[in-house]
Amino acid sequence: MRDLEGRTALVSGSTTGLGYGVANALAARGARVVIHGLAPAREGEAMAAALSRDHGVESWHSGADLADQAATEALCDQVLGRFGRCDIVVNNAVIRHFKPVEEFLPEEWNRALSVNLSSAFHFARAFVPGMKAQGWGRIINMSSIYGQRGAESRIDYVTTKTALLGMTRALAIELARTGITCNAVAPGTVPTEAITARIAGLAQAAGQSEAEAEADYLVGRNPTRRFVEIGNVAALIGFLCSDAGQDITGATLPIDGGWSAL
């Protein structure tokens, strides 16, 4: 299926795990893709080259630090200068800190707000005018199961993932008659590098195998007792970007193996 040919997509936080899976899925559907992340430039450029080679699309890597408003705005200018448009924005970039509130440094809090939340605002501010002009656009905010519930020692992550749901609703209503949709996707536990590394650490600390630690980790999370597949999250986002997704806006779509039903 090449239904996104002629479209340009920006996927923030896409040089690893879930973000790269989404970028790959959009490229497979024919979209030009801007991948973004703080990986070394050579690695990011190699990832972009792989997307181009595998899917016959133009791809480009940006290492912009989204904690810096000027760098975020410069990235927007570069995307428009290079491609002339940005039709799809997937706000996936995230940082998180695992610590209680009294140990949080103000600079850590501000950086999380900038990367996880404010960058999505700046992208909308920059790209919505072009989307309006062409009467088509897709904004997808990557929230989380933790956008609906609290968690210990994750105040930055829970707060920003919850705020993205409010931004989704606000933009969806504001843009409802423009041909632009805005939705949130809320995955459960996905086998990202950060999570698999955490499970490996838990296994080592408990003297368990990684399979045993993974099973313990999923208890109380995905009721399916397995990870949510990255490819399935990417496929959901691909559907939202298709013409069949034009009547879905302002929604929060869980893909969590039943976790939100608990």
Image (cartoon, helix red, strand yellow):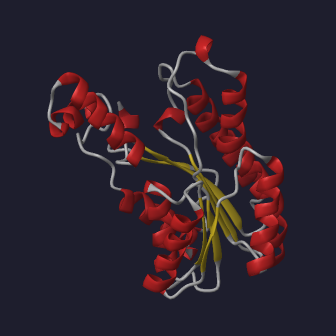
Q: Position of residue 195 (x, y in %)?
A: 37, 40
What residue lies at 72% left-to-right and 40% top-to-bottom? 114
Residue 175: x and y in percent read 77, 59
Looking at the image, residue 258 lies above or below residue 18:
above
Quadrant of residue 134 in the image?
Answer: bottom right
Q: Is residue 64 above or below residue 215?
A: below
Q: Quadrant of the C terminus?
A: top left
* Residue extending farthest top: 102
Name the foreground residue: 196 vs 125.
196
User: In the displayed structure, does residue 225 sit left or right of residue 230?
Assistant: left
**Residue lying at 50% horizontally and 25% vertically, measured from the top left:** 98
Q: Residue 123 at x, y = what percent?
A: 75, 57
Visible residue check, residue 131 = no
Image quarter of residue 232: bottom left
What is the x, y in percent for residue 39? 55, 56
Observer able to see residue 51 = yes
